[in-house]
Amino acid sequence: MLIMQLLVDGVGKGAIYAALALAIVVCHRSTGLINFAQGEFATLSAMLTAVLTASGIPVWFSLGIAVVVSFIGGALIQFVVVRPTLKRPHLVQIMITIGLYICANAVGQIVFGPTPRPLDPLFPAGGFSLVGIRISWDLVGVVLLQALVITALTLFFSRTKAGLGFRAVATAPAASRVVGIRVERMHMVGWGIAAALGAVAGVSLTNLGVYVEPSMMTPVLVFSLAAVTIGGFDSAIGAIVGGVVMGVVETFATSLIPGLSGDAGMLVSLVVIVAILLVRPQGIFGRERVARV
Amino acid sequence: MSEPTRSTRLRPSGRRAIGAAVVNLIVIAALVAIPLFFEPFRVTQFTQILVVALAVMGLNLLTGFTGQISVGHSAFFGFGAYSVGVIMANTDAPMPVALAAGTAIGALAGAVIGLPSLRIKDTSLAIVTLVFGASFPALVNMFTGLTGGTQGLRVERISPAEDFPFAADQTRYYVVLCAVLVVAACVLLLDRSRTGRELRALGDNEIAAVTFGVNAPRLRIGVFTASAAITALAGGLFAVTNGFISSGTSFVTILGSIEFLTALVIGGRAILIGPLLGAAIAQLLPAQLGQESPELAHLVYGVVLIVILLLAPGGLTGLRPSTWFRSRGPELPPLPTTAPPTKGSTA
């Protein structure tokens, strides 16, 4: 029974890792780089939601505003900071996202302050019991919300013209430009979608008992990076599966291994990442890259 | 701007070499003179700058030569600091032995993390090292009995003998300065050696380098180990000059890694002056602004990092003011990379 309970709790956390992992994958597919600031962007979105809610706006409405603002913010950052470095060496691009990480973290500290604040719950309190397993409405709500967002995103990519354009740019940028797709605009859309996804992930996290504070997303970022490594940097389905796997693995490891609790769970993700990269560097759902020599 | 960030240029020759030697000598003379003219508070601050500069030199060995990036050097710094602290707290080993052991343990940690770096490169290596760096404070807190966890660990500081001509703060400064100069000399020798050229070839184009007989696995592990060892030595020296370490000390958290990287980017690739300049700016800028608010300092930090990356990717020591007003020569052809040809718009 304990095992089932841990499994349920793990899936709840995993849903959030999956959402942020998906954001990282969308970002990587659009501009080919891993955005280390993705977690901090999500923190800023959660802070915005908290500030809006505190000023009397209902929490769902605040979340909506935060998603829209995050989309615009992500697209703007891509336009101003990331675009000029797209043809630079890898090192410069990674450093740019680390610079963004510092900036976002500092902005959060200055505007919001270091004091953790709770956010109004999105879902009703309480829960139900299923054959001895305690399941809270928060958990059900969080998982359903991520599922809804992921489904909507899948439909956007597979059923709309803009989504088709985005996939075209991700696969063949030069050819896309030839047929008239605005490659740069698609890059901006990618970063915007990633930031909006992060907003949902950040706010969802507060429903699992985490307060809004400057470094709330750092462990989530670590586990999401592990999820992306498991799934492959370019695979959306891989990110989702990887996220859920990491949520379950973390919950089991921190509950069953004595001495391993709290942030030490991150050590688990270190082991997982190194193991996956050594055995199957492209991830489980990723395609192997063929390089032209 | 037109200079590639990973330059294959061999040793500088003629006027430039003499100029560089003169600048280096002036800097070394200034470094030796500094503690004689400042009050103890400032000398302690400069000692900290030297410690950071040493850590950045370690990182520079990895990033500057092979073009690989590590976001986990704060963990190697922490391995060095805690090894020295724990050894000195629990045994009666003399300080030099503890420092040597700390460096060796850091090197061992580097070799272990360096092993996967044979197959894990670029973004993946950044992820692995980021997670390694982010989980180090948790690792420290797991062994609270030994390390003191968040409560911290007191370490005996360097203290001069009765008849020693320098005060305690000056002695600490000179010990760290010695380490910095010795490491700089070693890196310089490596840079001029066959191994140094092999390393740079590896960073520029691995396939070509291997084709010409470069033993890539041996060099990769070697450079990672040496890089970690230097940063661990910096951590050990931090422990014996600062006298206190805890899992909240910013140098052993992920913020430490970010500070080292920022200093590296600001300073550029020059072996001695780059890390010194970068460490000085990275340390003094927040200290000056931090009187108002430490958060503001971090914001300025991030903005400076991004602006330097956008405008002067070679760092401050990579700037060549004499070329700014000349007409630009032909752009160098891009280095062939192993990235798939579809990435990046080519139209």
Image (cartoon, grey):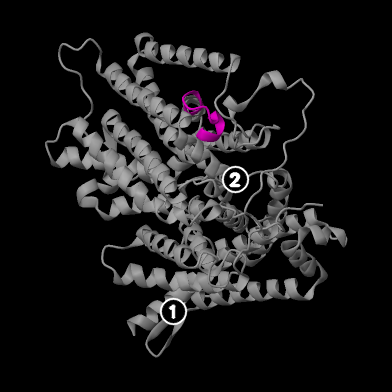
Name the front one of labels 2 and 1.
2
Name the residue: 66% across, 48% down: B336
Q: Position of residue B6 (x, y in %)?
A: 59, 37
Q: Residue at x 64, y 76 (%)?
A: A148
Location of the N terminus of chain B by quadrant is: top right
Location of mark 1 (residue)? A8
Q: Chain of mark 2?
A: A
Query: Is A11 on the left or on the right of B231, as rendered?
Result: right
Q: Which residue range is magenta in the image?
A: B264-275
Query: Residue at position x 48%, y 55% from top?
Result: A218
Q: CA distance from mark 2 to mark 1?
A: 35 Å
Tell which circle, 2 or 1, labels the residue nearer the N-terminal end. 1
Q: Is residue B150 above or below residue B15?
A: below
Crowding at mark 1 (Cα within 10 Å: few <14, some 14-19, many 20+)? many
| Residue type at numbered disc 2 | Leu
A272 on left or right of B3: left
Q: Badge 2: how crowded within 10 Å, few (<14), some, or many (20+)? A: many
User: Is residue B130 depicted above or below A102 in this figure?
Assistant: below
Q: Which one is nearer the viewer's eye here, A105 or B105?
A: B105
Q: Say which element carries label 1.
A: helix
Reading the image, the residue beneath label 2 is A100
Indicate the position of residue B123 as horizontal and vertical percent values. Answer: 55, 53
Residue A132 versus residue B129 in the image, above or below:
below
Residue A226 drawn above or below residue B93:
below
* Amino acid tagged 1: Val
Answer with left or right where residue B89 lies relative to residue A162: left
For the residues bearing labels 2 and 1, Cβ distance under 8 angstroms? no
Q: What is the quadrant of residue B255 in the picture?
A: top left
